[in-house]
Amino acid sequence: TGCFTYDNGFTATAACRSAITYIDGDAGVLMYRGYPIEQLAKQSNFVEVAYLLMHGELPKQDELAKFEGDITHHTMLHEAFKNFLDGFRHDAHPMAMLMGMVGSMASFYHNNLDYEDPAERRLAAIRLIAKVPTIAAACYRYSIGWPLRYPRNNLEYVTRFLHMMKEVPSEPLELNPVAAKALDLLFILHADHEQNASTSTVRLVGSTGANPYACVAAGVAALWGPAHGGANEAVLKMLGEIGRPENVQSAVDKAKDKESGFRLMGFGHRVYKNFDPRAKIIREMTYKVLDELGVNDPLLDVAIKLEEAALKDEYFIQRKLYPNVDFYSGIIYKALGIPTEMFTVMFAIARTAGWVSHWLEQQADPENKIGRPRQVYTGATERDYVAIGKR
Ligand code: CMC
């Protein structure tokens, strides 16, 4: 009862107006601020895309230089973060650490009243874009017992992150330019995707006026699930379980059997029902990376066989289930030597640009009101309380 519609999974409800990202799922179109993703992928870079998402326009040279300078200025973490990090178990999942560490930023920049000032809101957004990679690298190094490294601010965004994560003093990190380009491309493709589960979470928390770092920590939590950003990690786990190309067909058959409860991770999308335009771009880069790095990994053979088998299977064709961006991102991360537990963290670094852009848009929106869905009640009708001895 009540004058509202049951919309399980919000498949038909727009919860806000937004001018950031446009998707046409049937036509396979994705645009940030009106610019097609294919053009941004080819001609732009992640930091410029982050500027575009946040500000609505592509930056002029001096605007981009100032933006990069602002980000670089905020890459360091307060030393007290180390104490916080030290409290995690040695085998904590990096997403659990990231969620906690981003949430803890609220305790460093905590005065919510400041956020009524647009300049303070912009600063929070910059801090998040700047510090999330530093936190992500710290979580990784902590999980393998390596000492933390400070950000090398003479490097640009993606290479700075890779150095912070992987560099050891005795062996200077040799970065293949194709690897760095592939990571930058993945960051562009993952930067925003309108009202996906994690962005909607950021907005729902943001609608209450909560601290921006708390909002983004909630976004990290939502992203972690295997139906969302956790899919890239789930893809690699699944490939490991399949193990050998000979086992691919039985995995495909199992995914078609509803009783099995097994789905092919990295296939299907809520919005894209023909193809995922990001997957199209990244597929090409995946083969380039594998070629360039000369990677020889049996799991990658399994992935290629699986892609082939699913694409010609009637079940997947009928339901329009195509490999999504996370199918290929997992393969690239693996080829770049990034450990599986870090995959969703990589996604979170990129999506931070989208989360903060949506938070900024929402906070400046005079129509913003607290998000408060309704429900269809299915519980008991009214009944009388029964004393414990009489139940
Ligand atoms: N393997 C096997 N069957 C599938 C799969 C799959 N991966 N995905 C959907 N189906 C079937 C599903 O069983 C249903 O069949 P039927 O019509 O016979 O009941 C039909 O396809 C429609 O599925 P749905 O669950 O109603 O679709 P949805 O829009 O609610 O779910 C999805 C979209 C992405 C959650 C789902 O396709 C899925 O679980 N995929 C695997 C996880 C994954 O790769 N997630 C990453 C999504 S992209 C990145 C991101 O958003 O973060």
Image: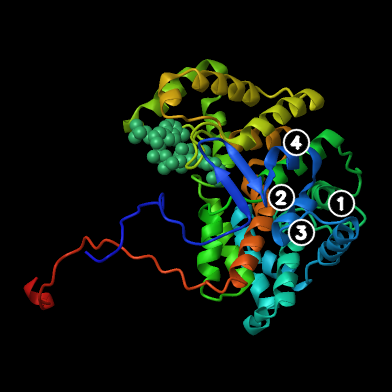
In the displayed structure, 305 sits above or below 58; it is above
Give the labeled residue for mark 3. Answer: 134
Marks 2 and 1, the one that precedes in the sequence: 2
Mark 4 or 2: in front is: 4
* Ligand 1 lies under 8 Å from the Cβ of mark 1: no
Give the labeled residue for mark 4. Answer: 336
In the displayed structure, 281 sits above or below 104; it is above
Mark 3 or 1: in front is: 1
* Ligand 1 lies under 8 Å from the Cβ of mark 4: no
Marks 4 and 2, the one that precedes in the sequence: 2
Marks 3 and 4, the one that precedes in the sequence: 3
Q: Nearer the viewer, residue 260 or 358?
A: 358
State how far apart marks 4 and 2 are (Cα).
17 Å
Q: Nearer the viewer, residue 95 or 332?
A: 332
Quadrant housing residue 120 = bottom right
Marks 3 and 2, the one that precedes in the sequence: 3
Give the labeled residue for mark 1. Answer: 156
Answer left or right for 13 relative to 211: left
Q: Amino acid at mark 3?
A: Thr
Q: Amino acid at mark 1?
A: Glu
Q: Quadrant of the N terminus?
A: bottom left
Callout 1: SS: loop
Q: Which circle marks residue 307 in the picture?
A: none
Quadrant of the picture in which ligand 1 is shown: top left
From this viewpoint, which residue is outermost toward the top? 246
Position of residue 192 measured from the top left corner of the image (x, y, whole percent): 63, 51
What colour scheme has been applied to the protein in the rendered image? rainbow
